[in-house]
Image: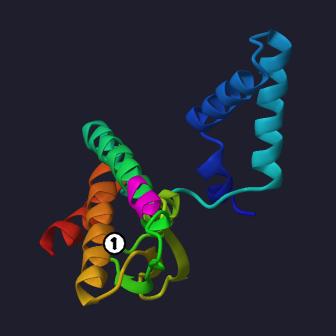
């Protein structure tokens, strides 16, 4: 274990954030609870060191708010779409697995995009190819090439918004170019 690896998770901000979560989960702000949370965070970080965060990632608060607002709307729309597909009697919903090549290349962005897509009703990540940055998305109610292209546009739009919210400058340039 290198010192560089440990520094990735043992920042004061990380420790404070985890202790706050610990106290909130227990629902009791006491000296004993804060000390126990701090000890646990330090112990976990030493026993299970994580790699340092990728360089160049930027948190852009306004873009984060835009992403969250639009994502909430998309969740409601997807829920309505799944409900319509379920209650269409006499017609089985069509599905497709769509390969989407992402433009961003960082592991963090690949993970965040896959997680966000997995939260949307009617879509599931089937496979991720890290080397090529390809997500294979199983999507409900896709019956033709137009539907496949719609899924690709939606995933790339989600990628663009996420990169604008928390992506690196190089990922942002790559996403905005295409």
As rendered, which of 104 and 113 lies closer to the eye? 113
Query: Is residue 103 visible in this depiction of the protein?
Result: no
Query: Is residue 146 visible in this depiction of the protein?
Result: yes
Query: What's drawn in magenta, residue-wise?
Result: 80-84
What percent of the width, then of the height, locates residue 156?
28, 70
In this rendering, would 134 be left or right of 18? left
Image quarter in which the N terminus is found: bottom right
Q: Residue at x 56, y 80 (%)?
A: 126
Q: List the residue tagged with mark 1.
A: 104
Q: Residue at x 86, y 15 (%)?
A: 32
Image quarter in which the C terminus is found: bottom left
Is disc 1 placed on a helix, strand or loop? Answer: loop
What percent of the width, then of the height, locates residue 73?
33, 46
Q: Residue at x 47, y 77 (%)?
A: 90
Main secondary structure along the magenta-highlighted residues: helix
Residue 81 sits inside the magenta stretch: yes
Image quarter of residue 139: bottom left
As rendered, which of 3 and 125 lies closer to the eye? 125
């Amino acid at each position: 274990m290198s010192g560089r690896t440990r520094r990735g998770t043992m920042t004061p901000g990380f420790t404070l954030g985890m202790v706050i979560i610990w106290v909130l989960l227990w629902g009791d702000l006491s000296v004993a609870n804060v000390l126990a949370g701090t000890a646990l965070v330090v112990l976990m970080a030493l026993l299970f060191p994580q790699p340092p965060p990728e360089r160049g990632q930027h948190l852009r608060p306004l873009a984060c708010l835009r992403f969250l607002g639009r994502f909430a709307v998309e969740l409601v729309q997807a829920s309505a779409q799944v409900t319509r597909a379920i209650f269409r009697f006499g017609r089985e919903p069509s599905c497709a697995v769509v390969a989407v090549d992402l433009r961003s290349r960082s592991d963090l962005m690949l993970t965040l995009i896959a997680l966000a897509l997995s939260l949307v009703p009617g879509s599931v990540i089937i496979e991720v190819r890290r080397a090529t940055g390809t997500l294979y998305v199983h999507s409900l109610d896709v019956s033709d090439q137009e539907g496949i292209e719609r899924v690709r546009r939606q995933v790339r739009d989600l990628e663009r918004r996420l990169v604008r919210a928390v992506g690196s400058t190089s990922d942002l340039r790559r996403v905005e170019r295409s």
